[in-house]
Image (cartoon, rainbow, N blue to C red):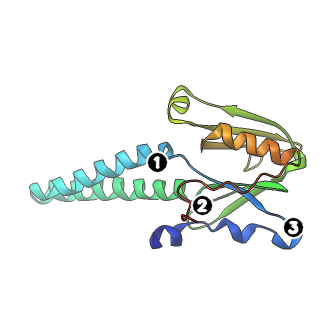
Amino acid sequence: MGVLNWLAPNVDQYILSTAGEQKVVEVRKHWAASAWPAVRLVLGVVIFVSAFAYQAPVYYVFVVIGLVLGLQALWRILEEYRDRFVITNQRVFRVHGVLAVQRASVPLLRILDITVRKSVIGRWLNYGDFVFESAAQVQGLNVITFVKDIDQREDVLRMVMLGEIPQPVVTAEEDDGT
């Protein structure tokens, strides 16, 4: 997991621990967000490998198409992996981006309305989208897509907004066994 840790956005560095802020939950994207890019990656690899069965002009076309398709799919998978939504006891924020990192945050007191959207596939696979309405204009935090276990995340967010800070939520992939 060394490469994945290196690629992770390390959201803990944005927690204002000197101001008493505590991370309640860090939400990673659901695997369905990377499903279509994974299909494109496999298709790109198949096209790239099949290029070796052809002669010069077709070979080069297949190599280029396979590489472009595969690299674009890898980039998209990395974008989805690095997109994190964090709920703290004082605010919610989102960190995303591959080379350049973008952060958006909203204090909990400025969130006026939370809408949860779940498509049919989202209901089957247990993910959905958060739509926030805040006292400010539309910003980088108004729609958060592919939130896994969205009902649980909404409950945690509402508890934090009411001042009831739950214990930090540890998901199965973050659990180190202790």
- Where is residue 41 shown, x and y percent of the image? 34, 52
Quadrant in which residue 149 is drawn: top right
- Is 38 displayed left or right of 44 in the figure? right
The crowd level at tag 1 (other Cα within 10 Å; few <14, some 14-19, many 20+) is some
Question: Is any part of residue 63 visible from this angle?
Answer: yes
Residue at x 69% of width, y 44% of height: 153
Q: Reading the chain from its start, which is encountered first: label 3 or label 2?
A: 3
The crowd level at tag 2 (other Cα within 10 Å; few <14, some 14-19, many 20+) is some
Residue designated by label 3: 20
Can you tell which of label 3 and label 2 is closer to the viewer? 3
Quadrant in which the C terminus appears: bottom right
Q: Is residue 100 above or below residue 58?
A: below
Q: Nearer the viewer, residue 123 or 56?
A: 123
- Where is residue 105 shown, x and y percent of the image? 78, 56
Can you tell which of label 1 and label 3 is closer to the viewer? 3
The tag on residue 97 is 2
Query: Disc 3 to disc 2, how far (Cα)?
Result: 27 Å
Residue at x 34% of width, y 56% of height: 70
In contact (CB < 8 Å): disc 1 and disc 3: no
Q: Reading the chain from its start, which is encountered first: label 1 or label 2?
A: 1
Residue designated by label 1: 34
- Name the kind of residue labelled 1 in the image: Ser
- Name the kind of residue labelled 3 in the image: Gly
Residue at x 48% of width, y 42% of height: 32
- Where is residue 74 shown, x and y percent of the image? 41, 58
Q: Reading the chain from its start, which is encountered first: label 1 or label 3?
A: 3
- Is 105 displayed left or right of 28 in the figure? right
* Element assignment for label 2: loop
